[in-house]
Image: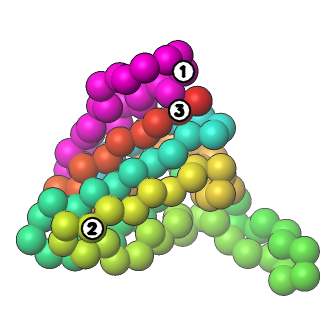
Amino acid sequence: MATIVSTSLGGTGQRTLTRTTLTGTADTFTYVAGALLILENPTGGALSPTITGASASSAIPVKGFGTVSAAGGYEVGSIAAGAARMIPLDSISEYLAGAISITNGTGLVAAIMVP
């Protein structure tokens, strides 16, 4: 289990980006509004991580669509070897209620940038 540490975007000039290699089993982070999560795949194969909030609702009303569940987590999809994904966390905030974990991401390198 790894804890992803955030890097602040506040202030001026450059800063060192904190990067964390994921273990694939309950890697954790804290959601901060306005944050960006970057997942890089330096491994030799594709990985498909899932981001899950322990208290995510199973009954979220979506206007014009009906009720959907966030309880199973946000499936990032396949990240090819050498590729990266950036996720604005506000866009998946319904999935981030309670303790947050990333699974199925063994070897991914994660960074979170917060305002």
Indicate the quadrant where residue 24 lies. bottom left
Considering every residue shown, the one lying at the far left of the view is 44
Q: How many labels does the image show?
A: 3
Asked whether residue 74 is in view, the answer is yes
Residue 78 x/y as whole percent: 34, 77
Residue at numbered disc 1: 10
Question: Which residue is at a point 44% across and 69% down the rendered structure image?
Answer: 76
- Of residues 94 and 35, which is closer to you in this image? 35
Q: Distance between the residues labelled 2 and 3?
A: 22 Å
Q: How far apart are marks 1 and 3 (CA)?
A: 8 Å
Question: Which residue is at a point 53% across and 32% down the rendered structure image?
Answer: 114
Give the overall secondary structure of the magenta segment.
loop
Residue at numbered disc 2: 83
Considering every residue shown, the one lying at the far bottom of the view is 65
Q: What element carries label 1?
A: loop
- Of residues 21 and 113, which is closer to you in this image? 113
Asked if the magenta segment contains residue 2, the reply would be yes
- Residue 47's tag is none
- Of residues 48 and 6, which is closer to you in this image? 6
Q: Is residue 66 above or below residue 51?
A: below
Residue 66 x/y as whole percent: 85, 81
Is the residue marked by circle 2 packed among few (<14), some (14-19), or many (20+) residues within 10 Å?
A: few
Amino acid at pointer 3: Val
Q: Is residue 52 left or right of residue 83?
A: right
> What residue range appears in magenta?
1-24
Amino acid at pointer 1: Gly
Q: What element carries label 2?
A: loop
Residue at numbered disc 3: 114
